[in-house]
Amino acid sequence: MEKPIAQAYFLHKTGKAKDAFVLKAFEVPQLKPHEVSIKVQAFGLNFADVMARRGRYRDAPNLPYVPGYDVVGIVVQTGSEENQAWIGKRVAAFCRFGGYATVVNTPINALVEIGQEVAAGAALSLCTQGVTASYMAELIHPAHNDGFVLVHAAAGGVGSLLLQLLHHRGFKTIAKVGTQEKAQRLTAINPTEILIEEHTDYFPMLQSVLGKNRLVASFNATGGKSIGKDLSLIGSGGHLVLFGGASLLASRFKWISMLKFVRNSGFFSPLPLMMGSKGIVGVNMLRLADDHPSLMERHLKQCFQLFNAGRLTPLSPNEFTSQQLAEAHSYLESGKSTGKVLVYWEGA
């Protein structure tokens, strides 16, 4: 039996988006019993995709490969008869790379059914970014839920959802954004405070907001010098949660960026953390998905339950066609985007 043929954007070289991808046909792998095959309508972009294209993502496969972690589409085939009820259903799903394709195979526990009325942008917002936000929100002990939390990149896909989840848990949310325009996108979310770091450093503003209070947690997607700043304002029992390293893209050259990142981040002895009763937590959702797939499944379902109940609302997405993949990547990399960046397959 011949394997079905699909198309996908392969990352075939690192560098600028306009040169990095090539559209090619490929044979769809044979389904395993625990998998389903999805005809993809749209796929999401995540910042890890940009890091991989720039050669800064250690967990990326060897080139060439098909990037992509989240898709929306229709289940067209299942690997076992017991799962055939999924055929024809519209779903949002995770995949371990391979999302930039017209057909994706993924495990049955990595998807959730969505109605035809749910826009692809909203559904994709709740996948990788929503699950990341949901997981991080639960890292903070409920005993601290009347304290201040800082969210970097607060108008991004993860940050905007994280603000809402933390608010529901009773925290006072401080949103850090880079421009006035991004601050305006957060109006409906209504964080406790918004810090706009367009022309001035956020740290003095943060000190002013806190006064004698200290942070319960900082959710930091930037790294670099902001790590030390945040740690200095985290109180006992608090956590610095690192879920990105945008400052790694500050230089064209990988080794220079890495050296600057390490130098600016600083070196930390466990003794001050222990004496101050503070913690640093790193978040890599790919590793968590590999080691704890049931955790991802729980948070995915939880995000859609909150969305369906009107308690979790993604920001308006940024939509591109598949012919605009390079533009979509460049836009996400520019730091100008708010909410999810996604790509539609024409005619799907």
Image: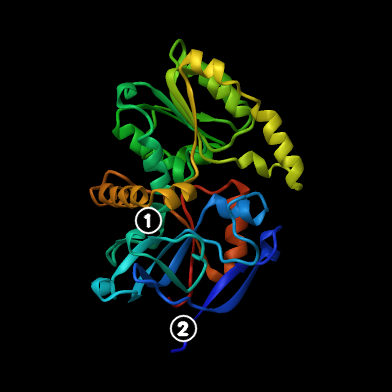
Percent x, y of residue 119: 35, 61
User: Position of 146 compared to 204: left or right?
Assistant: left
Residue neighbourhood size for the residue with mark 1, other residues' Cα within 10 Å, grouped as few (<14), some (14–19), many (≥20):
some
For residue 232, say whether it is visible: no
Residue occupying the far bottom of the picture: 1
Q: Residues within 10 Å of mark 2 (few under 14, many from 20)?
A: few
In this view, the residue in front, 98 or 270, is 270
Q: CA distance from mark 2 to mark 1?
A: 29 Å
Which element type, helix, strand or loop, lies under badge 2? Answer: loop
Q: Tell me if 343 is positioned left or right of 80 in this view.
A: right
Q: Nearer the viewer, residue 121 or 221?
A: 221
**In this rendering, is residue 28 above or below 12?**
below
Q: In the rendered image, which residue does mark 2 sit on?
A: 4
Q: Position of residue 93 (x, y in %)?
A: 38, 61
Q: Amino acid at mark 2?
A: Pro
> Looking at numbered disc 1 in the image, what kind of residue is underneath it?
Ala
Q: Residue at x 32, y 25 (%)?
A: 145
Q: Are marks 2 and 1 in contact (CB under 8 Å)?
A: no
Tell me if 142 is positioned left or right of 268 in this view: left
The residue sitting at 46% across, 39% down in the picture is 184
Depth order, front residue of 197/219? 219
Between circles 2 and 1, the one closer to the viewer is: 2
- Percent across and percent down for residue 139 are 38, 33
Residue pushed farthest top?
212
Name the secondary structure under disc 1. Answer: helix
Mark 1 — residue? 122
First in sequence: mark 2 or mark 1?
Answer: 2
